[in-house]
Image: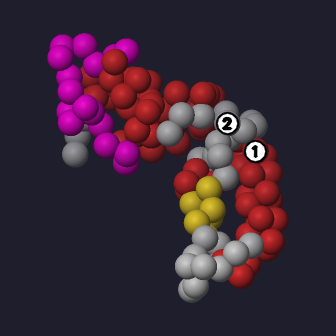
């Protein structure tokens, strides 16, 4: 889907908020829509996660190319340490660490699975 000029501005602003402030996609989209969504745009008219992620990648390439790869490696190392500690729960890394867009502002997201819901 092709974005119009306003949607592109919202996606770029949301990407900046995600990279620089560590906001999640939904919060960044709402805030960017408030700041750049003139003309009565509603949340349903806002760009989707795919468009925002494209802008996150563009922002990282333009403004963070010298620091982001090392930050991503460090966060992936943290994720791996915790995944090994929590191996019995079959951890899966998710979010920006999984997608390769994590920066020092990102959280490490691990999804855990247990066969027994009463497991400690």
Snapshot quadrant of residue 76: bottom right
Front residue of this view, candidates 17 and 69: 17
Mark 2, residue position: 105
Residue density around tag 2, few if under 14, some if 14–19, many if 20 or more, within 10 Å = few
Percent from the top left, x then y, of residue 99? Answer: 56, 56
Percent from the top left, x then y, of residue 81? Answer: 81, 65
Which residue is painted at 64% across and 42% down in the image? 106
Please determine whether, in this image, residue 14 is positioned above or below residue 34: below
Q: Give the mark, 1 or 2, whose residue is nearer the N terminus.
A: 1
Residue density around tag 1, few if under 14, some if 14–19, many if 20 or more, within 10 Å = some
Mark 1, residue position: 71
Side of 3 where 60 appears, left or right? right
Which residue is painted at 45% across and 31% down in the image? 28
Q: Quadrant of the C terminus?
A: bottom right
Please determine whether, in this image, residue 120 is positioned above or below residue 100: below
Tag 1 and tag 2, C-beta contact below 8 Å: no
């Amino acid at each position: 889907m092709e974005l119009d000029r306003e949607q592109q501005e919202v996606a770029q602003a949301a990407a900046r908020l995600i990279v620089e402030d560590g906001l999640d996609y939904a919060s960044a989209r709402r805030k960017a829509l408030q700041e750049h969504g003139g003309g009565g745009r509603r949340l349903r008219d806002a760009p989707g996660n795919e468009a925002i992620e494209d802008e996150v990648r563009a922002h990282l390439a333009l403004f963070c190319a010298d620091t982001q790869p090392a930050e991503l490696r460090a966060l992936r190392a943290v994720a791996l340490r915790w995944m090994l500690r929590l191996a019995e729960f079959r951890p899966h890394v998710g979010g920006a660490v999984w997608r390769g867009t994590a920066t020092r502002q990102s959280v490490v997201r691990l999804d855990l699975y247990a066969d027994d819901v009463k497991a400690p």
